[in-house]
Amino acid sequence: MKNYLDTINQEVREYFKILSPEFPEWLLEYINTPEMQRIGGISMNCGTDYSKLFDIRYWYSNLEHSIGVALIVWHFTHDKKQTLAGLFHDIATPTFKHVIDFMNGDSEKQESTEERTEQIIRDSKEIVNLLHRDGIKIEEVMDYHIYPIADNDTPQLSADRFEYNFSSGLILKRVWNLETIKEIYDNVTILKNENGIDELGFKDWKICEKYIHIVSKLWPEWISDEDRTVMQFLADVVKSMHVKGYLTIDDLYHLSEKEIIEKILNCEDDYIKQSFIQFQKATSVYGSDTPVNDKYCISVKGKRRYVIPLTRI
């Protein structure tokens, strides 16, 4: 497992070193569990990797995101419980990630798929044994919401929010490079917010402004017509596959995205299969005030993201 870091993109390895110059070796055994390895087959880009509407620079999985969150938490706390809660926070993520929230009618909050986290951890013999060895209770790592450095409510900053903004700004829309990320990250510290609770913030308001200016170029991508169309289309395909008996809900928590796509492309229902093939060929999305015959038309809201950071001065 020590070779795990050698299997990922070189830029991602360098990015991880920024988040935590010393990689915590004890974390590798947890990363190597089947439940964590499963989310290595799920992209952070919610299906956009499979559309010509987007130019994704390279594969970045939900596992890499989870490791990134854990490294940020470890860097600021050196607390194993909080770090593991960060690592496990997406362990229940289904195939295509928030696409399944769209399928569940939860396109704005995107929280409908979080309920399996505790059960997945409890059902994992490997994780349970590691936790027992390290003297950690399941209750202490199954909900990262209890640790404000790992996660908190919008508009506050946290490890999770920093990580997906940093990584998406590298691979989805190139809004910064590693040098800029390091400049910003090195200015981050733990502050007390207005409620007296620990929160990640900035030492210098100028760096804070720079962060907001850059990351605000990224956020529109997540509510663009292209993004919402891709996610809703995939949601409709997965739902159709489920309704017609070609997929089970459990499949979404056991199979990789490539395995699900293979099922779609080999589906006996020619309409589903051909629709997905046409989706993969599409290069444009158009807007209309009214539905257009013989076209895939949707009207769906996306999740709006914003932060109001803390600064020391």
Image (cartoon, rainbow, N blue to C red):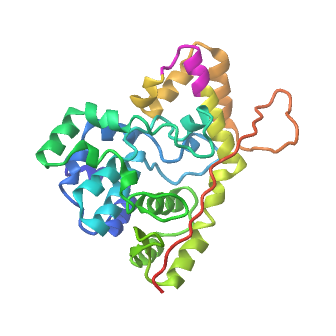
Above or below, 272 against 157 in this view is above
Residue 243 falls within the magenta-colored stretch? yes
Q: Position of residue 155 (x, y in %)?
A: 55, 63
Where residue 247 appears, as percent x and y from the top left, is 50, 20
Magenta highlight range = 238-248
Q: Is residue 133 left or right of residue 231?
A: left
Q: Give the residue at x 20% y 36%.
A: 126
- Outermost residue to the front: 195
Q: Number of callouts in the render?
A: 0
Query: Residue placed farthest to the right in the image?
Result: 290
Left or right for 294, reference 271: right
Toward the left, the furthest residue is 133
Q: 199 or 202, which is in the foreground?
A: 199
Residue at x-position 57% and y-position 39%: 50
Give the residue displayed 75% in from the left and 36% down from the top.
Answer: 298
Q: Is residue 110 left or right of residue 227?
A: left
Q: Nearer the viewer, residue 128 or 262?
A: 128
Q: Residue furthest bottom?
A: 313
Q: Residue at x 42, y 47 (%)?
A: 61
Q: Is residue 111 magenta?
A: no
Lateral position of residue 130 relative to residue 267, left or right: left
Q: Quadrant of residue 301?
A: top right
Closer to us: 168 or 58: 168
Task: Give the image quarter of residue 199.
Answer: bottom left
Whether residue 6 is situated above or below residue 253 in the rendered picture: below
Could you tell me residue 85's position as x and y percent?
Answer: 32, 51
Position of residue 190 measured from the top left corner of the image (x, y, whole percent): 37, 73
Say above or below: 112 vs 251. below
